[in-house]
C-alpha cells in the first residue's frame, strides 16, 4: 500500500530531519513513536504532501505521490498536530464546508462522521464554544469525511479525557481493519493493544519497523527496578538510563534501562511500550556505538 524508499528531508542549513528512511506498510494501525525532534512530523508532512522530500520516493499503491500529490490527497484523511477549528461556525456547517472542498457528495456523511466521534448532539453548537477535547474529536471527524484509505493522525489525543481516549482507540482499531491508519504519538497508551506495527524514529533515522511484541522481546533483560538511597541514585544516573523516579522518605524507587544488571540489588522487570519509547533509542545507540 505505502512504500517509502530512501526518503530524506534536509532543512537549511543542514538539519537531516528525515535521514534515508525506507519502509513498506499495509493496512492496519501503525504507531509512529520517537522523542521530540525525532523527525515524526517531518515524515508525516511529506506523506500528506504538505512538504516535498529532498530526496527519495513515496509510492501509494504504486503511484508516485511526490510527482502526483493530488492522487494522495484524494485518498488521505489527515489530523494535524495543531488542528484548531477556531472558525465561528457550527460543527455541522464546518464539516459541510470541508466536505464540499473535498468533493464529498453524500449529504449523510457529515452526520455519520459526527456520530463516529460522538459529537452528533453538538452538531448545531458553535466550535468557538467547544472544549479542547471536542475540537480534537471534530478534527478526527473531518479527517474521515472522504472515507479515506489512508488516515494520518499526529498527536491525536492531546486534550482528550480518559473516556475520549478509549473511544478514540476503539475508533482507530475499527478503521484499521480496512485502512492504513498511521498514528504519531508520545502517549504510548494511544497505540497499545491496537497497533499491529510500530515505527521507532530517532534523530531522523528509522530505528525499527517491528511488531509491538517483538520490540518488547528485544527490550527484555534491559529494564530493572531498584529501591535505593538518594546518594546511590545520584551516582547511578551518571551511567544508567533512569526511566522513572519515585522519591519517598526512605529513599528512591527507580525504573532503569541498562544492557546488564546495573547493581546486585536491581531486579529485572517486564518491559512496557512506554519503556520502548523512552529507552529503545538510547539502548540502540549504545549497542551500535
Ligand atoms: N521548518 C524547519 N526548519 C528547520 N528545522 C526544522 C523545521 N521543522 C523541524 N525542524 C527540525 O527537524 C527535526 C525534526 O523535527 P520534527 O518536528 O519532524 O520532529 P518530531 O519527531 O515531530 O518532534 P515532536 O514530537 O516534538 O513534534 C528537529 O531537529 C527540528 O528542530
Image (cartoon, grey):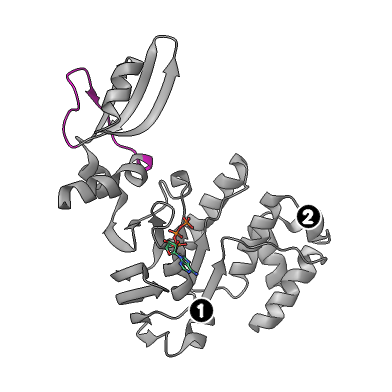
Residues rendered magenta in the picture: 259-274
In magenta segment, residue 227: no
Q: Dot 2, how many residues are within 10 Å of its Cα: few (below 14), some (14-19), or many (20+)? A: few
Callout in the foreground (1, 2): 1
The quadrant of the picture occupied by the N terminus is bottom left
Residue 86 located left or right of residue 280? right
Decide if ligand 1 comes within 8 Å of the CB at mark 1. no
Q: Between 74 and 266, which is closer to the camera in this rendering?
A: 266
Dominant secondary structure (helix, strand or loop) of the stretch shown in magenta: loop
Q: Can see residue 177?
A: no
Q: Nearer the viewer, residue 174 or 29?
A: 29
Quarter residue 233 falls in: top left
Q: Position of residue 18 (x, y in %)?
A: 36, 68
Marks 1/2 in contact by CB < 8 Å: the verdict is no
Determine the residue positioned at 35% across, 85% down. Answer: 62
Q: Which residue is mark 1?
A: 75
Left or right of residue 137, residue 157 in this image: left
Q: Residue 259 in the image: x percent, y percent?
A: 18, 37
Quote the CA–CA distance across marks 1 and 2.
28 Å
Instruction: Tell me if residue 158 comes above or below residue 110 in the rendering.
Output: above
Which residue was labeled with disc 2? 121
Q: Tell me the tag on residue 97.
A: none
The structure residue drawn at horizontal position 44% and vertical position 75%, both measured from the top left corner, is: 46
**Viewer-nearest residue: 269 or 259:** 259
Q: Secondary structure at mark 2?
A: helix
Name the residue at the top extreme.
250
Residue occupying image coordinates x 38% and y 13%: 251
Compare marks 1 and 2 and give the one earlier in the sequence. Answer: 1
Direction from residue 234 to residue 265 in the image, left or right: left
Residue 48 position, x and y percent, is: 49, 75
Query: Alpha-carbon neighbours of circle 1 within 10 Å: few (<14), some, or many (≥20)?
Result: some
Quarter residue 91 falls in? bottom right
Amino acid at each position: 500500500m505505502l512504500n517509502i524508499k530512501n526518503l530524506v528531508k534536509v532543512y537549511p542549513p543542514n538539519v537531516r530531519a528525515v535521514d534515508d528512511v525506507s519502509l513498506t506498510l499495509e493496512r492496519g494501525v501503525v504507531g509512529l513513536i520517537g522523542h521530540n525532534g525525532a523527525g515524526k512530523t517531518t515524515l508525516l508532512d511529506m506523506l500528506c504532501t504538505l512538504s516535498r522530500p529532498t530526496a527519495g520516493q513515496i509510492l501509494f499503491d504504486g503511484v508516485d505521490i511526490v510527482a502526483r500529490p493530488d492522487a494522495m490527497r484524494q485518498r488521505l484523511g489527515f489530523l494535524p498536530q495543531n488542528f484548531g477549528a477556531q472558525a465561528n461556525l457550527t460543527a455541522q456547517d464546518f464539516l459541510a464546508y470541508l466536505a464540499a472542498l473535498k468533493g464529498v457528495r453524500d449529504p449523510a456523511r457529515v452526520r455519520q462522521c459526527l456520530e463516529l466521534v460522538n459529537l452528533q448532539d453538538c452538531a448545531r453548537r458553535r466550535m468557538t464554544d467547544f472544549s479542547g477535547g471536542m475540537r480534537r474529536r471534530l478534527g478526527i471527524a473531518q479527517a474521515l469525511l472522504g472515507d479515506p484509505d489512508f488516515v494520518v493522525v499526529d498527536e491525536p489525543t492531546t486534550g482528550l479525557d480518559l473516556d475520549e481516549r478509549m473511544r478514540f482507540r476503539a475508533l482507530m482499531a475499527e478503521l484499521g481493519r480496512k485502512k492504513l491508519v498511521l498514528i504519531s504519538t508520545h502517549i504510548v497508551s494511544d497505540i497499545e493493544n491496537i497497533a499491529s506495527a510500530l515505527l521507532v524514529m530517532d534523530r531522523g533515522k528509522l530505528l525499527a519497523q517491528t511488531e509491538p511484541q517483538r520490540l518488547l522481546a528485544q527490550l527484555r533483560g534491559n529494564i530493572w527496578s531498584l529501591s535505593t538511597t538518594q546518594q546511590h541514585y545520584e551516582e547511578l544516573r551518571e551511567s544508567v538510563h533512569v526511566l522513572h523516579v519515585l522519591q519517598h522518605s526512605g529513599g528512591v524507587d527507580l525504573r532503569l534501562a541498562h544492557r546488564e544488571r546495573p547493581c546486585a540489588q536491581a531486579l529485572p522487570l517486564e518491559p512496557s511500550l512506554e519503556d520502548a519509547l523512552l529507552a529503545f533509542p538510547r539502548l540502540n545507540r549504545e549497542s551500535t556505538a
